[in-house]
Amino acid sequence: MKIGVFEWVCSGGVDGVVENVNNGQQACCSGDHFTASSSRRSSNEVEHNELHKLFREGRAMLETVSLGLSSAGFDVIVPIAQGLQESIGAVAANSLSLRVLSPESSDIQQSVLNHWGLIARDCDLVVAIAPECDQILQHCIASLQSDVGQQNVRALLCNCTGRFLRYASCKWLTAQAFKTVGIRHPPTQRLDAVDCEWIESTRACCRILDGSARWLIKPFDGADCDGIRLCDANELLAATAKALEQREASPANIIVQPYLSGQSFSCSAFVSPSGSVTWLPLTEQRIELVEHVRGFGLKYCGGEVLPSAPVDPSLANVLEGALKACSPGAAGMVGFDLVCEDPGREWTLVEINPRFTTSIVGLQAAYSGNLLAELIEIWQVQESRLRSAGKLSSQIGLRSQIELRGTFDSCSFSAAGDITNRLCP
């Protein structure tokens, strides 16, 4: 079975990634996160380590997924940007089928998508890994659907699509979906609609730092902690005033939420073609407060898999409700970000990631077997059953939970994929 594992950054989808990684040059970004739009800031406005961080995280997910599948005997095909072969040492050294990509035109993003489409037609299954920033993930999936879905029915896309992808990729739409069905979620408002009344109504939800309540300003479609800014009430009102001034020329696709107290966690689920769900253990996230040019923000530093804290039925019900609220279209790996404040263990669901996240690095390392291989096996079995029933195109609802054969132990990992502590049987 041929499986294509397509990772956006390592494929060269971010302008300047090859030069940055190999020569330490800076690359084009927008604000605090990169952009795929034609309007770009000059490279000297962005620090080298921001792009290198994107590359390290992308490489970590690519190596984990591709090597896990390859070790199980799958024929894994990996697109790599020309010039990055040596930087993807683990992948290159394990006899995977590398497809080296060279830009065909000045439109680097479209060139990568064209290459992905050609490679996908030679695959039986495709897994795409890309950030939500500037709708990159949505563009990737739409392009692959066009190439794979219509021209090569053998290649199925192991990714979220449709309404689920659109809602989970946009924090504002996610908030609206959760509100409609009553899922516990931080109060959320558009930046250009924030006023004193809303600030006062949410103040009690905020974490207190240096004696002041704090809120988070986030882009609609940010990935990781990129683009998130921490502010007090006065700074928030100033940001709102600026957004209102610029609203006609450039609408602010930015939301505001209280900076919640409590510990941050993530939980991953694998959704099969039939809608069955495999829940993976909770991961405790390590998030640090960092200072940027524009003020304070957050930095995701990795986490620790918690085998002693499996997804209990009550939390699973909340997460299934979130999946249903944004469905149809959930498929493949889905990540959930949560906050829990003791005592009481009451969970607040912050957002959904309709893709692989760096948690897969720790989960694969902590598992007693080959996690990626088992998940693909689940996908194959469910897809085969649907084909036999003639229902492959009618993905409906969540039906049941599928248990894994192995067990998880403790594992700490960094955002860049380094395993810092592993206690496996």
Image (cartoon, rainbow, N blue to C red):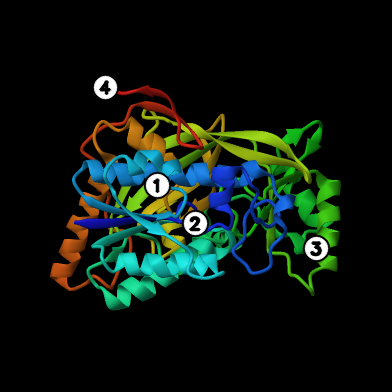
Amino acid type of the residue that numbered disc 1 sits on in the rendered structure:
Leu
Mark sitting on residue 12: 2
Circles 3 and 1: CB distance less than 8 Å? no
Q: Position of residue 315 (x, y in %)?
A: 42, 43
SS category of the residue bearing label 2 = loop
Q: Is residue 307 visible?
A: yes
- Residue at numbered disc 1: 62
Earlier sequence position, callout 3 versus callout 1: 1
- Residue at numbered disc 3: 243
Disc 3 crowd rating (10 Å Cα; few below 14, some 14-19, many 20+) is many
- The mark lying in front, picked from 1 and 4, is 1
Disc 4 crowd rating (10 Å Cα; few below 14, some 14-19, many 20+) is few
Residue at image position (81%, 36%) is 212
Q: Is residue 193 above or below residue 391?
A: above
Q: CA distance from mark 3 to mark 4?
A: 54 Å
Amino acid type of the residue that numbered disc 3 sits on in the rendered structure:
Ala
Report whether 118 appears left or right of 55.
left
- Residue at numbered disc 4: 425
- The mark lying in front, picked from 2 and 1, is 2
Amino acid type of the residue that numbered disc 2 sits on in the rendered structure:
Gly
Q: CA distance from mark 4 to mark 2?
A: 38 Å
Number of numbered callouts drawn: 4
- The mark lying in front, picked from 4 and 2, is 2
Circles 4 and 2: CB distance less than 8 Å? no
Q: CA distance from mark 3 to mark 1?
A: 37 Å
Quadrant location of the N terminus?
A: bottom left
Earlier sequence position, callout 2 versus callout 1: 2
Q: Is residue 61 above or below residue 304?
A: below
Q: Is residue 328 visible?
A: no
